[in-house]
Image (cartoon, rainbow, N blue to C red):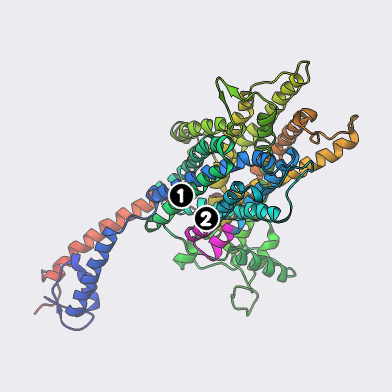
């Protein structure tokens, strides 16, 4: 029995039952009983609640990625055929309509990323945009099933008009809005399930992106085979029904996983960027201090604020003026910004050359989804034995390549490379992207060779055709390129992004896709306009009535040469880029572990020394 130091009564308790709190705080027995009861209730609740985060939560995200991409990728590779056969577009109009749709889809991923970072959680954003995607698929199903909602054949570049045109473009771009919004939030939702400050979970983050791509690939494989075959040979509207059901089931599974997710609180990333630009502009007449430590920064004593502090860098010094705190000025948001806030804007600025130098690769990918599909559908032999292969199903070749290579990459290459480079992902994200860029240039060169061979045989007398399997070379090479680049960009933009901008930053991956598709449309129009003037035949490379009347192989080689030049730009950008982890002082996990062991040792000693005091032993102090 000892007298409590906090006043009031005698306390008889053990260290495990909150005795130190009672000893130093002097709670009454009734208060202590209530606290113990609620503590036990809390522990029971935590024990019964599902463990949040990790791959346990990502399983639901992987299911959605697979099911949603079944229909999305199936539509992506077959839309050009649908536009030509049902909507009666000419082949170059169908190609441009598809690339504009895909460009809009990935551009709208920025909207999904912005909303999930600023207003809603990433989980809620996925469900809202997913609902829009399902509504769009239902509308497309109705139009494909109703003959009166389809245009009559004509000889114009586009035959749709009136209400048919309104419904077609409304459903198409509502699908772009829904699909894009989901893509802006879903990868970041999955990555949020891993704590980057935990060494084990930080290592698992790279694995997550690989498995995320594998889920997309497996779903896409089902889409380009089963759904495409069903759409092109049975009925287009029935194929859309299957896509709708698959997407609906995917979002139901995502909703069921809510108890397992770590949900982040939305912030306002755009507002932070605007604040830095505004304050830097307002302070443009002020001189920067010689010592950067004189710039305004959050206090190291604030553990929450200091957790994501970024060290000052000497690049883009003009932005540093936003962190100048004039004398007799209160540190308010629109009067001064912290060094960390300025550095966050610098990080995004340094990302821009990387983003720009990966756009052309996606322009190359657009050709495989448009002109290559048209090659296979109209001018190549699609028979494989007794079976006729739908042209949009040819991408199954790179998808199968990717499905196997992702597993090999994760289980063989990464552990081997990790031993050499000591990097948790085996190689850096930018190295991975570089490999993809080289392979995409090679893919376009091969595509040109295949088309040149096909065109030469088509112009012989009698004309000859080559097997559609010749397309497997360009598809296979580009599939490997996509495996390297897509995951590399997703991981790069997520890891390098400031904490409150990860959805928006991850959407930069889809932004490169968007610009790539739009650039494809621009290239087609410019190439046609220029070659009509400079070629002896006065015909554009891509303006023939059929592909046999065009010079598609020259367009492929044009993209291959541009890709090589673009790779040089990328190498320069990557060499100049400084990873955020290099400028931030990362926690030393070995020291943290040692510190934890020391604290544990001290706690044991403290318990051994305090226990006799509580039990009235020799060192208990004054006793009655």
The residue shown at (47%, 31%) is 408
| Residue 173 falls in image quadrant | bottom right
Report the residue that reaches farthest toward the left.
Answer: 624
In the rendered image, residue 113 lying in the magenta stretch gets the answer: yes
Report the residue that reaches farthest toward the front.
Answer: 148
Q: Of helix, strand and loop, which one carries label 2?
A: helix
Image x and y of residue 390, in percent: 59, 31
Q: Nearer the viewer, residue 280 or 386?
A: 386
Tell whether label 2 touches label 1 (CB within 8 Å). yes
In the rendered image, residue 620 lying in the magenta stretch gets the answer: no
Task: Using the image, determine if residue 203 lies above or below residue 438.
Answer: below
Residue 414 as seen in the image, left or right of residue 572 = left
Residue 545 as seen in the image, left or right of residue 427 = right
> What residue range appears in magenta?
112-130
| Few, some or many residues within 10 Å of mark 1 (<14, 14–19, 20+) | many
Q: Nearer the viewer, residue 158 or 58?
A: 158
| Few, some or many residues within 10 Å of mark 2 (<14, 14–19, 20+) | many
Q: Residue 130: which disc?
A: 2
Q: What whole-number distance in Å separates the C-alpha atoms at marks 1 and 2?
A: 9 Å
Image x and y of residue 515, in percent: 69, 48
Residue labelled with disc 1: 250
Q: Main secondary structure of the magenta part?
A: helix
Image x and y of residue 277, in percent: 68, 65
């Amino acid at each position: 029995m000892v007298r409590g130091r906090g006043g009031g009564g005698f306390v008889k308790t053990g260290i495990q039952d909150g005795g130190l709190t009672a000893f130093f705080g002097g709670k009454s027995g009734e208060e202590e009983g209530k606290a113990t009861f609620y503590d036990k209730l809390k522990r029971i609740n935590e024990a019964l609640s599902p463990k949040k985060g990790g791959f346990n939560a990502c399983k639901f995200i992987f299911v959605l990625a697979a099911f949603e991409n079944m229909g999305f990728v199936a539509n992506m590779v077959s839309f050009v055929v649908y536009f030509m056969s049902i909507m009666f577009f000419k082949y170059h109009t169908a190609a441009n309509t598809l690339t504009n749709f895909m460009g809009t889809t990935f551009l709208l991923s920025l909207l999904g990323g912005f909303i999930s970072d600023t207003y809603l959680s990433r989980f809620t954003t996925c469900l809202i945009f997913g609902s829009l995607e399902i509504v769009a698929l239902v509308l497309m199903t109705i139009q494909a099933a109703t003959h009166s909602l389809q245009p009559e054949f004509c000889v114009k570049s586009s035959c749709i008009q009136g209400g048919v045109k309104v419904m077609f473009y409304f459903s198409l771009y509502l699908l772009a809005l829904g699909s894009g919004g989901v893509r802006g939030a879903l990868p970041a939702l999955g990555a949020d399930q891993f704590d980057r400050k935990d060494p084990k979970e930080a290592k698992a983050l790279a694995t997550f992106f690989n498995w995320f791509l594998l889920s997309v690939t497996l779903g896409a494989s089902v889409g380009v085979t089963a759904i495409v075959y069903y759409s092109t040979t049975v009925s287009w509207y029935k194929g859309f029904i299957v896509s709708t059901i698959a997407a609906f089931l995917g979002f139901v599974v995502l909703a069921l996983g809510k108890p397992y997710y770590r949900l982040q609180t939305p912030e306002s990333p755009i507002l932070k960027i605007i604040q830095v630009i505004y304050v830097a502009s307002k302070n443009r007449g002020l001189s920067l201090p010689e010592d950067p430590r004189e710039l305004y920064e959050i206090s190291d004593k604030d553990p929450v604020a200091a957790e994501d502090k970024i060290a000052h860098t000497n690049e883009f010094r003009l932005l540093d003026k936003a962190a100048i705190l004039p004398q007799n000025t209160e540190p308010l948001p629109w009067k001064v910004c912290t060094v960390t806030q300025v550095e966050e804007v610098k990080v995004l600025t340094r990302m821009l050359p990387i983003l720009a130098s990966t756009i052309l690769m996606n322009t190359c990918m657009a050709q495989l989804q448009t002109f290559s599909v048209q090659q296979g559908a109209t001018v190549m032999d699609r028979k494989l034995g007794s079976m006729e292969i739908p042209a949009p199903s040819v991408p199954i070749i790179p998808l199968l390549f990717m499905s196997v290579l992702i597993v090999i990459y994760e289980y063989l290459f990464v552990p081997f490379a990790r031993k050499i480079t000591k990097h948790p992902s085996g190689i850096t994200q930018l190295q991975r992207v570089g490999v993809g860029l080289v392979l995409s240039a090679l893919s376009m060169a091969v595509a040109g060779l295949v088309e040149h061979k096909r065109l030469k045989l088509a112009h012989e007398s009698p004309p000859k055709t080559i097997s559609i399997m010749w397309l497997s070379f360009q598809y296979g090479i580009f599939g490997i390129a996509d495996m390297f680049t897509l995951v590399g960009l997703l991981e790069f933009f997520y890891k390098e992004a400031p904490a409150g901008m990860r959805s928006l930053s991850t959407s930069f991956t889809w932004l490169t896709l968007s610009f790539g598709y739009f650039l494809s449309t621009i290239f087609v129009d410019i190439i046609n306009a220029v070659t009509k003037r400079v070629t002896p035949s006065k015909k554009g490379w891509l303006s023939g009535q059929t592909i046999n009347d065009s010079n598609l192989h020259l367009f492929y080689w044009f993209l291959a040469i541009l890709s090589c030049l673009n790779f040089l730009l990328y190498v320069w950008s990557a060499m100049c880029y400084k990873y955020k982890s290099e400028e931030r002082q990362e926690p030393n996990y070995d020291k943290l572990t040692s510190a934890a062991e020391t604290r544990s040792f001290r706690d044991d000693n403290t318990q051994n020394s305090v226990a006799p005091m509580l039990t009235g032993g020799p060192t208990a102090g004054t006793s009655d």
